[in-house]
Amino acid sequence: MSATTSAAHPSPMHFFQTIHAYQSTAALQAGIALDVFTHLARRGTATATELAADCKAHPKGIRVLCDYLVLSGLLTKQAPSPDWTTHRWSNTPDSQLFLDARSPAALTGSVAFLGHEGMKPVVDELIAAVRKGGTPHPGDGSVEVENPAWVDFARTMVPIVLPGADRLPELLGTKPETVRILDVAAGHGMFGIRCAQANPQAHITALDWKNVLVVAKENAQKFGVSDRYTTIPGSAFDVEWGSQYDVVLLTNFLHHFDIPTNEALLRKSRAALKPGGKVAILEFVPNDDRVTPPPAASFVMIMLRETPGGDAYTLRELSGMLTSTGFRDVQAHSLDPHPETWVMATA
């Protein structure tokens, strides 16, 4: 999972991968603790459902863990169709020899011993998430109401989100006339703020929890658009959004929830838009095999540990959610080398 950076395309991916390197250790230790490698050695190849039964875990949890082990070079994968329930995993030759607990050359005990004691809470948490198929944290994990972590997120993430925010006005094709934009789960507010900077006639409405909107309003003031920036405090699921917007932004939001919840959000988005308005979704979008490209594919591990039903959705899955809720003309715009993708659709 190494990153390369060319002079023509600077990328922060090396830093992201380094800060999340602990997940590789946790995934290996969780795979050993759940006997994933031993069961695969016995079966030869297996689906998530088959392994889940063997490991006494949830199929989604097994899918996420095994995909991450593919990214780490510890498993291989066959993905014959976009339906992940048909995907099959196998051991690599090295894993077959050294991580099958029945093998005379097994290193499973040594690896568990060598794992740093400080990793134990992370590994235990991941094992619990794999068994459950979602966060083992009490309540709703990272999407808990008024979670103070999102204030820290809003204050620290501006440099990271700018590549996506800077591209947005161009993709929306902002027109000279007044544009009403609703920024759902606005956080730092930079996606709407960049649109307001690009179009002096645009008006932004930011929706988020009250404690987070403090940061968005600070940024609107800092970047000179506070006179065209209003807020709606509260949960996106509970408060009224208003109507007749030209654009609804759903940035880094859908990955926190399962598909039925996202479809409810998309129906609410469509009701808030003018006819012909656009929804703009920013997400980590893996390919149908769910192990490429690595930066987008590996993101799902965070969602498994931190949310009850979150996931990293493929373009096929996002398109399905959009068309089933009445949107049309779905278009995807990669931000490569940035790991995210803009997905646009018309109401």
Image: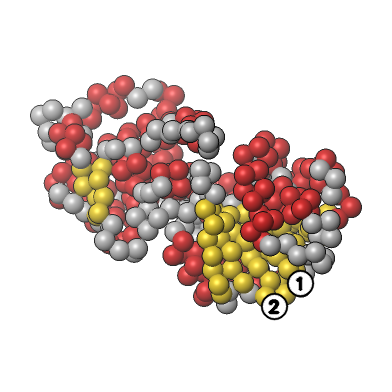
Q: Which mark is residue 149?
A: none
Q: Residue at x 53, y 37 (%)?
A: 9
Mark 2 residue element: strand
Q: Residue at x 37, y 53 (%)?
A: 290
- Viewer-side label of 2, 1: 2
Q: Which residue is mark 2?
A: 275
User: Which residue lies most toward the right here?
Assistant: 227
Q: Quadrant of the N terminus?
A: top left
Q: Residue at x 38, y 49 (%)?
A: 292
Q: Which residue is mark 1?
A: 243
Q: Amino acid at mark 2?
A: Pro
Question: Compared with residue 165, is residue 171 higher up or lower down, i.e. above or below?
Answer: below
Residue 69: image location, x then y, percent: 32, 41
Question: Compared with residue 145, is residue 249 higher up or lower down, i.e. above or below?
Answer: below
Between 221 and 173, which is closer to the camera in this rendering? 173
Between 104 and 68, which is closer to the camera in this rendering? 68
> How packed is label 2: few (under 14 Cα within 10 Å), some, or many (20 or more)?
few
Residue 68: image location, x then y, percent: 36, 43
